[in-house]
Amino acid sequence: MFRPYETEPYFDEMLKNNEPKPHYKSFCNKLMEFSENELQQKNDAAQSNFLKQGITFTVYGAEGGTERTMPFDFVPIIITHDHWRTIENGMKQRVEALNLFLHDIYHEQQILKAGIIPATLVDHNPHYYKEVIGAKIPLDNHIFLAGIDLIRDDHGTYRVLEDNLRNPSGISYVYKNRAIMKQVYPEFFSNYTLHTFDHQLSTMREALLAHRPMSLQPTQEPHAVLLTAGIYNSAYYDHVFLAKQLNISLVEGRDLIVKDCFVYMKTIRGLERVDIIYRRIDDDFLDPAVFREDSLLGVPHILEAYKAGNVAILNAVGNAVADDKAMYAYVPDMIRFYLNEEPIIQNVKTYMLSDPPQRKWVLEHIHELVIKNVGASGGYDMLIGPHASEEEIEVFRKKITENPNQYIAQPTIKLSRAPVYQNNHFYPCHVDLRVFVMKGNETNVLLGGLSRVALKEGSLIVNSSQGGGAKDTWVLKEEDQHVK
Amino acid sequence: MLSRVAGSLFWMARYSERTAANTHIIHTQFVQMLEESGLDTTYLEDWTVILNVCGSSKEFFDTYDKLSVRNLSHYLLYSKENFNSLIHTISSIRENARMTRDIIPHALWEEWNEFYLSLKDDPQSPIFSLLEINRFLEKINHTSLTSTGIINTLMSRDEGYHFLKIGRWIERAEKTMIILNELLQKKEHEIRKCTATYSLQLTQTLEDFSKKHRICNTDSVLNYLIKDATCTHSLSYCIQHMKQSISVLEQNNNNCRLSPLLQELQAIQQAISSVDIATMSIEQQKICIGSFLTHCIMLGSVFSKAYYLDESFPTYEFQ
């Protein structure tokens, strides 16, 4: 059964001074009414539901089959109304600035000319594609869907940990986590009034269809598709879910063909023109005639059609230059430069190892810091100083010295924790929150987002490929409802 | 609809029908086997027919040293080398269902996914006791019937539904002809003795036939399985329903792309109506069934070309 635990030195989402916080009280009262047996049964029902429905992700190279479910934990992350407003405003501001930045560096490059961001960081970035410099894209919008990862520090302050502007995945889990929660744990919802996200996918569809390519006649309805890498892609379930919800065809590269600078899909009745492609494959694989020629996932000459304004590709080509871990450090400066505002949600302090004084300091304090490869994701090529062995630290010292531009350092944040129930007992685990931002004619934030949890006790890595799980995220509709 | 997706639906239906038919055939034969001595020559002949209907007897005898329950059940149920083993066809259904998850009802995907996972998780598989094999076959039969019910109940009658249906009719027509073709390869006195009832048992039509006919001999059964437009496993029924589905798909448009397909269907229907089994010798019947079987095999390929289901056929036209 659930018993309050020692929360110090971390910020805990649910507890304060061994007591549930006001907005968790009703949940905790309900929790106490369940027997161990009941909780176990419910937990088993929830996990098997994910498997039965095939809500899985693929782990490459995993032994004994490649499909796994993301473990689900039923204790939700509850966000109060005021906190959510701050997050929402902060995310809109951040995505707005990132979009202006992307547009700027592929056109006038004012931010580089003003010396706000070192030009080398853009010019030498392997994801800065000269092939799309000057390309005119619908709505001048590079970011149709962003996934911004937030954490809370030991004071409970939200901070941005990472921006994902390429192919952020996980929206399907937001919906499925809520559906399973309603199906298996309906009792916990009593006394809460939550923001529902039932209608938000229609907002996403509107945003998608707003990206009309320039050559499309005003009277014509755009024809949109979702481009997937196929059933073996780790996020295939996400692709199926979105295609179904957005009511668009789920296509693979081999289903598309470019003829005379237009993109067509191969149907049972011949070729049908495609106007908008929400692609879920990376830039490198998009067009074998321009990028990786060994790509079997992409469509030859699709970039020509894109640059001619005959097809919209979402997210835009070349976004990765703005979401690597080195550029991340400059996002607050982008907000100040483009919007003339102060960032509403702050970054985690980041040290640039290309700068000799900062590098020297980092190498001296490496035991206290987190080191990250600027181009890696998913928790790979990363050192968590306080948890690392001397050998691991030496490996990273060498990597930094040999290739300082490739790494950044951050202080070890005391990530907030929340209780989880796994293997018949409760224990606290570190959590983060991926917030999804959709941008078409307007910018909207998906209410709630995906709460990810590092299920291994003490672990800081929440990524599903490395043993992370997910929780439902509740956004309260009224600030004072929990007082009642 | 995307050609690739239509192709997946078509093949999903064909594998579903193949799974259901092979499950029934294997079950029928295992039950029949209980009354037969392993020394009886008909035992060997019957199993050769079953192996050719559900796989290949040559492949079986090349791989295994003797006819035993263990070897037969391994080849027909679990073999990864036999592309028509039940494990293989079930896995193909699930793979095609996974490719078309955005089209098919969620419940249909769940039904096959859950069944597939239950097979993967079963620590005892493969199983070789007759009792366990029987349970396994019943489970497959139950899943097949449930999935057919889901399609009929939940799917809107749009393109996806008709591709599933056409896949089923083609597979079924072909299977009926394969069964008849194999049974007619037996010695003449054996054909006269048991082909009629056995072919009805294998095609799941014994009950229906018995209601409609008093005399059960080779001629009446062949006639029934070719011409009876109300028997759901007859060639006539499958071709007629396939034609109906194509006409819904095309809404009676005259599309020249479909000419070879429509001509093929027309040719089969004409052959069905002109055939007179009663006046034929056994040799002529063999030739007639062989010709229908060739037409059925052709039909799958002509249909795939008409709707661009075959990816190696890239001469796309603009819509």
Image: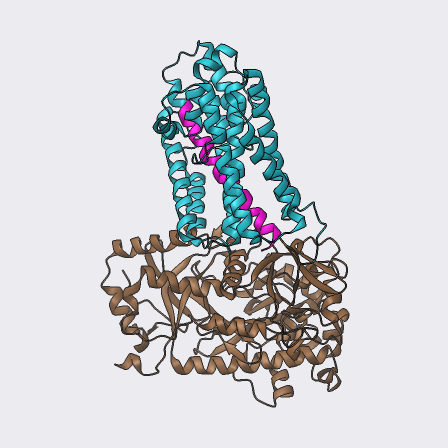
Magenta part of the chain: B1-29
Taking depth in this image into account, of B182 and A292 the one nearest to the observer is B182
Determine whether, in the image, residue B313 is placed left or right of residue B230.
right
- In the displayed orientation, state which residue is furthest to the bottom: A340
In percent of width and height, residue B195 lies at: 46, 18
Predominant SS along the magenta part: helix
Is residue B20 shown in magenta? yes
Measuring from the top left, give residue A251's x and y in whole percent: 60, 57
- Quadrant the C terminus of chain A occupies: bottom left
| Depth order, front residue of A224/A431 | A224
Q: Label the brown chain with its letter.
A: A
Q: Where on the picture, by quarter, is residue A179?
A: bottom left
In the image, taking residue A103 as reference, residue A198 lies left or right, namely: left
Corner quadrant of residue A73? bottom left
Image position of A450 (left or right of B281) = left
Depth order, front residue of A64/A398: A64
Relative height, residue A206 to residue A260 (above, below): below
Residue B300 visible? The answer is: yes
- Number of numbered tags placed on the structure image: 0
The residue lying at 26 percent from left, 53 percent from top is A37
Residue A467 painted magenta: no
**Residue B156 x/y as whole percent:** 45, 55
Q: Nearer the viewer, residue A300 or A14?
A: A300
Tell me which residue sits at (66%, 53%) in the image: A254
Quarter that holds the N terminus of chain A? bottom left
Residue B275 to residue A406: above or below: above
Figure colour scheme:
by chain
Instruction: Identify the colour of chain B in the image.
Output: cyan
